[in-house]
Image (cartoon, rainbow, N blue to C red):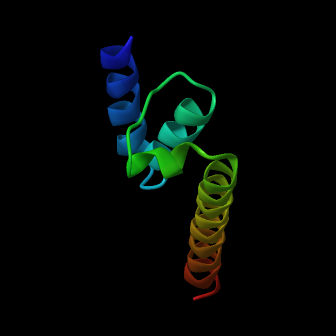
Amino acid sequence: MTLFLAFLIGVFAGLRSLTAPAATAWAAYLGWLRLERPLALIGSLPAALIITVALTNCHYSISNRSAVTAANVVDG
């Protein structure tokens, strides 16, 4: 099971830079992944929420930036 979760974390890491830490935080919080100190802090609910919000904000800022760039190219 741990090897499977490690594989999934690696797959997520290729998608976005903050997806792997978010997946790790939620897996540790839900008890799917057991982390020892000092990494156990990542498994707390506040840490999982903060990382998830950071991931969401990063995604929206990248999406908006590409839309602005595309509009500038069209407008000339």
Residue drawn at x 57%, y 24% as measured from the top left: 31
Q: Quick one: 23 or 28, which is closer to the camera?
A: 28
Q: Quadrant of residue 53?
A: bottom right
x and y percentages locating residue 18 in the rendered image: 48, 54
* Vertical relation: 44 (above or below) 53: above
Question: Which image quadrant: the C terminus?
Answer: bottom right
In this rendering, does residue 9 appear at all? yes
Picture quadrant of residue 47:
bottom right
> 62 above or below 16?
below
Most distant residue in the bottom direction: 76
Question: Is 72 drawn above or below residue 13 in the view shown?
Answer: below
Residue in the image at 69% along x and 46% along y: 45
In the image, what residue occupies the spot 64% across and 78% down?
A: 68
How many labels were placed on the picture? 0
Q: Which sits in the foreground, 15 or 8?
A: 8
**Residue at the (35%, 42%) spot, across then down:** 14
Q: Position of residue 6 (x, y in %)?
A: 33, 26
From the top left corner, tell me how far across and down residue 46 is, in percent. 69, 55
| 8 vs 66, nearest the viewer | 8
On the question of residue 22 being in view, the answer is no
Looking at this view, name the residue that lies furthest to the front. 37
| Residue 11 left/right relative to 75 | left
Q: Quadrant of the N terminus?
A: top left
